[in-house]
Image (cartoon, rainbow, N blue to C red):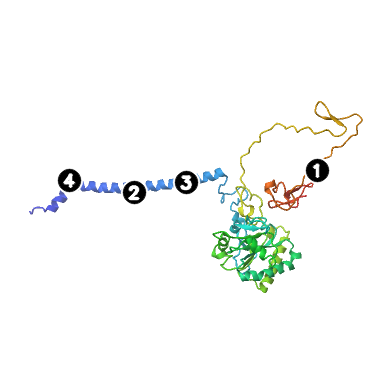
Amino acid sequence: MSEPTRLDLKDTDPARAKARLYVRWAVVNVMLTTLACGLAMLIWLKEGEVRRQLARVLQREKQGCVDTTRVLDSKTALIVDPEEVAPPQDQPRSGYVGKFGTQISPAMLVKLEAIRDPSKPAVEVRFGAQEVLPSQAVHVVNLWATWCGPCKAEMPDFKAMFARKAETWSDAVKFVPVQLKDNTDPRKSYQDFADVMPYAAVKLADRSYDEKFVKVLEGEQARQLFRGNLPVTFVLDCNRRVRWAKFEQLTEADFEDLEKHLDQLHAELSDDSPDAWCKKSWPGNGRCEGKENTAAHHSPEDCGELKKRGPAVESPVLPPVEAPADACPPGQFRAGDGRCSRLKGAPVTTKVEKPQGPKTCGNGVCEPARGESSQTCCQDCPCDAPLVCKPDASDRHTCQAKGLK
């Protein structure tokens, strides 16, 4: 019988076989431990994400802005996203855009230089402010520059069109010029072209370093309203949607088409039917309606910046100040108690009120420095939409709802 080889001895050694078994179990334990650690790490990461989401929800609840897009009431669905109630939009194109038009809400937030009076410095105003784009009106916005020959060539045609339709359109169709890509003084520019340009209550200019208004109008490729060239003309309807646009100098045929569509948009203003286009309500239509001026449903393009209310401060109660005693009227004497008493037999005199000094309210200029605001003088400082300035029962002009008697 031959002797076993060295390899056979190794395989038959019980100690070695037992050791190999321990090694295998050790490897299995290491693999299981690694897997358990990885699983524990994954659970820890998921738990952290859940905690962060829970913290955000609690923070929203604390601020009163809970996301309830998918929460249903017992009767009707709660629509939280304001975009869900806005009508669909049409893609901008040359000429008539469509019956829904294109909304340009970002442009309404851009602040531009405004010229009200050429003799006074320009002031900064939001493009969507009521003094620039008042509600219940159609606006012809024209982008131009003093160096642009086609811009200057079409101005007399604009003026002729507005003069021809002045009686029909009245104040419901407005011309809004915006000077772009031009470093000249806008006051001088508008003064030089006043004879060939239609009347505009507010004349605008964008002289910002980064050309904010231009960049907003360039926007996405599908909704561009500025394509690198001037002039540009677009029409905003009663809901501030672009319904007509042209990206070059207008020809005679273009003016005929523009006038025809302006007549149609002007007719929409007088539509009193319940489902009238100009009566539809959604954030971005230019009318500060419903809860749009509240923190939870604020619409900056319609209502402007939300005014912050400071903490209530109690005014100290001051003791009454005694006015110096004036001389008693004729026929009266000052008694011991300080009051004027009539002499016996003296004729009865009536007190004549001193005339009040001149007031600044009603001069057509809103002067906050003199205490004027829409609450104190709505004749000069316009009311926030949808309120209008009208006399009340005491014949004092106050901001009231339209149609209220």
Amino acid type, residue under disc 2 in the picture: Leu
* Along the viewing direction, whichever of 344 and 207 lies nearer the viewer: 344
- The reply to whether callout 4 and callout 1 are in contact (CB within 8 Å) is no
Q: Mark 3 Cα within 10 Å, few/some/many (few <14, many 20+)? A: few
- The reply to whether callout 2 and callout 1 are in contact (CB within 8 Å) is no
Compared with 374, 117 (above or below) is below
Question: Which badge, 4 or 1, is on the more N-terminal residue?
Answer: 4
Residue 100 visible to an observer of this rendering: no
Badge 1 is on which residue?
Answer: 355
As helix, strand or loop, the secondary structure at mark 2 comes to helix
Q: Mark 4 Cα within 10 Å, few/some/many (few <14, many 20+)? A: few
Give the left or right position of residue 387, taking residue 215 as reference: right
Compared with 334, 228 (above or below) is below
Task: Say which mark, if any, is on residue 35.
Answer: 2
Front position among marks 4 and 1: 1
As helix, strand or loop, the secondary structure at mark 3 comes to helix
Amino acid type, residue under disc 4 in the picture: Ala
Front position among marks 3 and 2: 3
Q: Quadrant of residue 171?
A: bottom right
Rendering coords of residue 370 (x, y %): 69, 46
Front position among marks 4 and 3: 3
Badge 4 is on which residue?
Answer: 15
Amino acid type, residue under disc 1 in the picture: Pro
Badge 3 is on which residue?
Answer: 52
- The reply to whether callout 4 and callout 3 are in contact (CB within 8 Å) is no
Q: In the orientation shown, which residue stands out farthest toward the top? A: 336
Front position among marks 3 and 1: 1
